[in-house]
């Protein structure tokens, strides 16, 4: 199969990126075009300025189109967790006689489970934490089921629904630009697949995506998300605190945050940051304390989430898996991961793409979406072949 180029629209809470890419060698990617632009952003209630977002989206897509020699037939859109609702369901299908499971059986299990949910809205993806047969042994990949005879198929299934608001806004925008084929991908699910190794996901794995306006925490098991929650806090919350407490302008607040490092302890009282913008000095300890105080809001949300769903978080099962942190926010807050770990009493690690130039947490979502879109392309091609042959039957 020829590996075609795919188009990806990555929507973050203060920046939008459009890119074209294909697979390279040794897990790398070949980029045929990439363009990013900041805009007003969004919160849990929606975009602050839909016009600002639409104009930014049109500019980045048009910029890449102008330099691309081919035709863009389909766009894969990353859906931020703020606009995704995750529903889980344990479901079972019984057969009249023992037989080998086919791909149609797995798809029928998904469809039957979704119908039982009675959810309205657009389901943009389905996945499974795991499957099981009559012996209750767990299978994390559907491909492992096909050679095993059984009279029962079980699944811990996950369904991802996009909000009507986001779906209609994006669909209208892209169709007006002439794109009729649009596929939606849950952004955090794509990051979980790309950033967290399969073995880690066979236990409970935790992914904290720290953004500019919003952040989210997801609990991943196998190939599904068990729980997910988003919060209206991130880098912007810290910048606001710096502006209010120090009486400074936004550019100076950005400069102080970029130079600060909160991983250390108490610093000498006479140590100060000197702003290159307005040449004023600011005590390092005071700046660090403001940043820590603002970051504590996110820590409190994360801690509440963990206590709500995982009260026994000190148990060995949970504590052996550190919280994997990514996103542009953790790049902007030096020492942020260490502070979160101390504040909530849980080990943390920073995760990012293992790629030259893109080996930064701020690149995680765009690279993960590209990887998922390319994997979908391969799976769709294989599915067409298998459907011609009557489905996967071994």
Image (cartoon, rainbow, N blue to C red):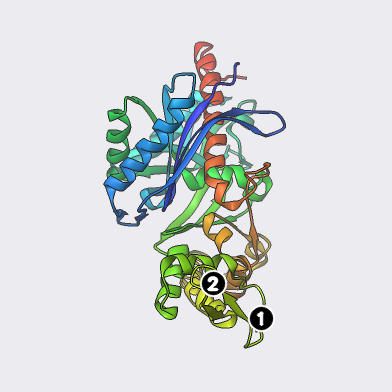
Residue in the image at 58% along x and 76% along y: 273
Residue, disc 2: 275
The one nearer the camera, 67 or 314, is 67
- Does residue 121 appear in the picture of this structure? no
Q: Are marks 1 and 2 in contact (CB under 8 Å)?
A: no
| Foreground tag (1 vs 2) | 2
List the residue tagged with mark 1.
Answer: 265
User: Please, is residue 20 above or below residue 92 in the view?
Assistant: above
Q: Nearer the viewer, residue 299 or 252?
A: 252
Q: Nearer the viewer, residue 35 or 296?
A: 35
Helix, strand or loop status at disc 1: loop
Residue found farthest to the bottom = 269
Badge number at residue 249: none
Question: Is residue 302 left or right of 262 when viewed as pictured?
Answer: left
Q: Residue furthest right?
A: 26
Q: Disc 1 versus disc 2: distance between alpha carbons?
A: 22 Å
Quarter of the figure with residue 349: bottom right
Can residue 157 be seen?
Answer: yes
Q: Secondary structure at mark 2?
A: loop
**Lateral position of residue 246 relative to residue 289, left or right:** left
């Amino acid at each position: 199969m020829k590996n075609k180029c795919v188009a990806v629209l990555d929507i973050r809470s203060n920046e939008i990126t459009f890119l074209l890419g294909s697979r390279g060698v040794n897990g790398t990617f070949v980029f045929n075009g990439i363009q990013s632009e900041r805009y007003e952003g969004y919160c849990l209630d929606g975009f602050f300025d839909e016009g600002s977002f639409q104009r930014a989206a049109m500019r980045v897509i048009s910029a890449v189109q102008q330099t691309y020699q081919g035709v863009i037939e389909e766009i894969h859109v990353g859906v931020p967790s703020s606009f995704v609702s995750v529903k889980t369901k344990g479901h079972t299908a019984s057969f009249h006689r023992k037989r080998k499971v086919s791909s149609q059986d797995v798809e029928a299990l998904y469809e039957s489970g979704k119908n039982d949910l009675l959810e309205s809205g657009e389901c943009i993806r389905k996945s499974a934490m795991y499957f099981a047969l009559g012996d209750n042994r767990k299978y994390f990949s559907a491909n492992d089921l096909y050679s095993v005879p059984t009279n029962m198929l079980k699944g811990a299934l996950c369904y991802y629904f996009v909000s009507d608001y986001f779906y209609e806004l994006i669909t209208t925008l892209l169709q007006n630009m002439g794109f009729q084929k649009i596929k939606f991908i849950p952004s955090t699910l794509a990051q979980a697949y790309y950033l967290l190794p399969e073995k880690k996901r066979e236990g409970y794995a935790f992914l904290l995506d720290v953004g500019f306006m919003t952040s989210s925490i997801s609990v991943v098991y196998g190939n599904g998300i068990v729980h997910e929650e988003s919060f209206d806090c991130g880098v912007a919350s810290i910048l606001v605190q710096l502006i209010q407490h120090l009486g400074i302008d936004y550019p100076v607040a950005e400069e102080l945050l970029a130079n600060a490092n909160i991983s250390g302890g108490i610093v000498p009282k006479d140590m100060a940051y000197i702003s290159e913008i307005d040449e004023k000095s600011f005590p390092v300890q005071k700046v660090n304390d403001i940043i820590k105080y603002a970051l504590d809001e996110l820590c409190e949300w994360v801690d509440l989430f963990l206590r709500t769903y995982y009260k026994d978080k000190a148990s060995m099962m949970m504590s052996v898996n550190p919280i994997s942190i990514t996103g542009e926010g953790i790049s902007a807050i030096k020492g942020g991961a260490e502070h979160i770990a101390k504040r909530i009493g849980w080990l943390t690690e920073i995760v990012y793409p293992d790629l030259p130039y893109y080996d930064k947490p701020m690149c995680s979502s765009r690279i993960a979406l590209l990887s998922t879109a390319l994997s979908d392309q391969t799976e769709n091609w294989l599915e067409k072949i298998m459907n011609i042959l009557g489905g996967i039957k071994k």
